[in-house]
Image (spheres, helix red, strand yellow):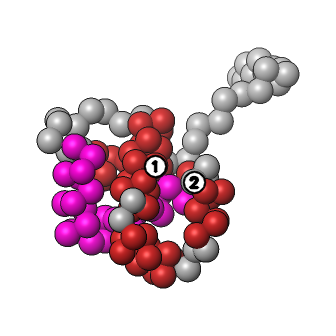
Amino acid sequence: MLDPRPINRDRAEWIAIAVLGSIAKDPSRLERFLTVTGIAPRAVRVLADDERFLAGVVDYVAEDPALVAIILSELSLHPADLSMAQYALRKPKREEPSSNVVRLPIPPRRVK
Protein backbone atom coordinates (compact mmCIF):
# COMPACT_ATOMS: atom_id res chain seq x y z
CA MET A 1 0.00 0.00 0.00
CA LEU A 2 1.33 3.43 -0.92
CA ASP A 3 1.51 6.39 1.44
CA PRO A 4 -1.29 8.87 0.85
CA ARG A 5 -0.56 11.82 -1.40
CA PRO A 6 -2.28 15.17 -1.05
CA ILE A 7 -5.57 14.98 -2.87
CA ASN A 8 -6.73 17.51 -5.40
CA ARG A 9 -9.98 17.29 -7.32
CA ASP A 10 -8.37 15.56 -10.33
CA ARG A 11 -6.81 12.86 -8.16
CA ALA A 12 -10.08 12.46 -6.25
CA GLU A 13 -11.94 11.95 -9.53
CA TRP A 14 -9.29 9.46 -10.67
CA ILE A 15 -9.70 7.51 -7.42
CA ALA A 16 -13.50 7.49 -7.76
CA ILE A 17 -13.31 6.31 -11.38
CA ALA A 18 -10.83 3.60 -10.39
CA VAL A 19 -13.16 2.52 -7.58
CA LEU A 20 -16.07 2.41 -10.03
CA GLY A 21 -13.94 0.29 -12.39
CA SER A 22 -13.14 -2.06 -9.54
CA ILE A 23 -16.84 -2.42 -8.79
CA ALA A 24 -17.69 -2.92 -12.47
CA LYS A 25 -15.12 -5.67 -13.09
CA ASP A 26 -16.76 -8.00 -10.55
CA PRO A 27 -20.27 -9.05 -11.65
CA SER A 28 -21.57 -9.61 -8.10
CA ARG A 29 -20.23 -6.23 -6.92
CA LEU A 30 -21.72 -4.52 -9.95
CA GLU A 31 -25.09 -6.19 -9.49
CA ARG A 32 -25.22 -5.17 -5.83
CA PHE A 33 -24.15 -1.59 -6.68
CA LEU A 34 -26.86 -1.26 -9.34
CA THR A 35 -29.49 -2.78 -7.04
CA VAL A 36 -28.63 -0.58 -4.06
CA THR A 37 -28.37 2.64 -6.08
CA GLY A 38 -31.23 1.92 -8.47
CA ILE A 39 -29.10 3.03 -11.42
CA ALA A 40 -29.61 1.39 -14.80
CA PRO A 41 -26.47 -0.25 -16.21
CA ARG A 42 -26.49 2.03 -19.26
CA ALA A 43 -26.65 5.14 -17.10
CA VAL A 44 -23.35 4.41 -15.36
CA ARG A 45 -21.24 5.56 -18.34
CA VAL A 46 -23.15 8.81 -18.62
CA LEU A 47 -23.09 9.46 -14.89
CA ALA A 48 -19.36 8.73 -14.61
CA ASP A 49 -18.68 12.29 -15.80
CA ASP A 50 -20.67 13.77 -12.91
CA GLU A 51 -18.59 14.50 -9.82
CA ARG A 52 -21.66 14.12 -7.59
CA PHE A 53 -22.08 10.58 -8.90
CA LEU A 54 -18.38 9.91 -8.34
CA ALA A 55 -18.69 11.20 -4.77
CA GLY A 56 -21.63 8.82 -4.33
CA VAL A 57 -19.55 5.90 -5.63
CA VAL A 58 -16.86 6.61 -3.02
CA ASP A 59 -19.54 7.00 -0.33
CA TYR A 60 -21.11 3.69 -1.37
CA VAL A 61 -17.81 1.84 -1.00
CA ALA A 62 -16.94 3.59 2.27
CA GLU A 63 -20.12 2.15 3.84
CA ASP A 64 -18.80 -1.42 3.53
CA PRO A 65 -15.49 -2.05 5.38
CA ALA A 66 -14.95 -5.40 3.62
CA LEU A 67 -15.42 -3.78 0.20
CA VAL A 68 -13.10 -0.93 1.22
CA ALA A 69 -10.36 -3.42 2.10
CA ILE A 70 -10.75 -5.30 -1.18
CA ILE A 71 -10.77 -2.21 -3.37
CA LEU A 72 -7.89 -0.52 -1.56
CA SER A 73 -5.86 -3.67 -2.03
CA GLU A 74 -6.77 -3.98 -5.72
CA LEU A 75 -5.94 -0.35 -6.42
CA SER A 76 -2.90 -0.17 -4.10
CA LEU A 77 -4.34 2.84 -2.32
CA HIS A 78 -3.82 4.01 1.23
CA PRO A 79 -6.99 4.05 3.37
CA ALA A 80 -6.68 7.83 3.76
CA ASP A 81 -6.91 8.22 -0.03
CA LEU A 82 -10.54 7.16 0.05
CA SER A 83 -11.57 9.59 2.76
CA MET A 84 -9.59 12.42 1.18
CA ALA A 85 -11.27 11.69 -2.15
CA GLN A 86 -14.66 11.85 -0.42
CA TYR A 87 -13.77 15.22 1.02
CA ALA A 88 -12.36 16.63 -2.23
CA LEU A 89 -15.38 15.54 -4.27
CA ARG A 90 -17.81 17.01 -1.74
CA LYS A 91 -16.08 20.41 -1.65
CA PRO A 92 -17.67 22.90 -4.04
CA LYS A 93 -15.53 23.72 -7.03
CA ARG A 94 -13.87 27.10 -6.89
CA GLU A 95 -15.26 29.09 -9.71
CA GLU A 96 -12.60 30.79 -11.75
CA PRO A 97 -13.56 34.31 -12.74
CA SER A 98 -14.57 34.60 -16.34
CA SER A 99 -12.10 36.44 -18.55
CA ASN A 100 -14.79 38.86 -19.66
CA VAL A 101 -15.66 39.95 -16.12
CA VAL A 102 -14.47 43.44 -15.29
CA ARG A 103 -13.63 43.95 -11.64
CA LEU A 104 -14.17 47.48 -10.48
CA PRO A 105 -12.06 48.88 -7.68
CA ILE A 106 -13.82 49.33 -4.39
CA PRO A 107 -14.07 53.04 -3.62
CA PRO A 108 -12.50 54.15 -0.36
CA ARG A 109 -14.82 54.63 2.59
CA ARG A 110 -15.63 58.17 3.46
CA VAL A 111 -14.65 59.15 6.94
CA LYS A 112 -16.93 61.64 8.67
Q: Is residue 57 on the magenta stretch?
A: yes
Q: Look at the image and give the residue range highlighted in magenta.
A: 52-76
Q: Could one spot residue 66 in this view of the protein?
A: yes
Residue beneath the point at 55% across and 80% down: 38
Crowding at mark 2 (Cα within 10 Å: few <14, some 14-19, many 20+): some
Q: Amino acid at mark 2?
A: Ala
Q: Which mark is residue 48?
A: 2
Rendered location of residue 44, percent (x, y): 58, 62
Q: Could one spot residue 58 in this view of the protein?
A: no
The relative height of residue 7 versus residue 72 in the rendered view (above or below) is above
Is most of the magenta stretch helix, strand or loop?
A: helix
Q: Which mark is residue 65?
A: none
Q: Amino acid at mark 1?
A: Ile
Crowding at mark 1 (Cα within 10 Å: few <14, some 14-19, many 20+): some
Rendered location of residue 98, percent (x, y): 77, 26
Q: Earlier in the sequence, mark 1 or mark 2?
A: 1
Rendered location of residue 100, percent (x, y): 85, 22
Residue beneath the point at 31% across and 71% down: 63
Q: Which mark is residue 17?
A: 1
Residue beneath the point at 36% across and 74% down: 28
The relative height of residue 103 versus residue 71 in the rendered view (above or below) is above
Is mark 1 in CB contact (under 8 Å) with mark 2?
yes
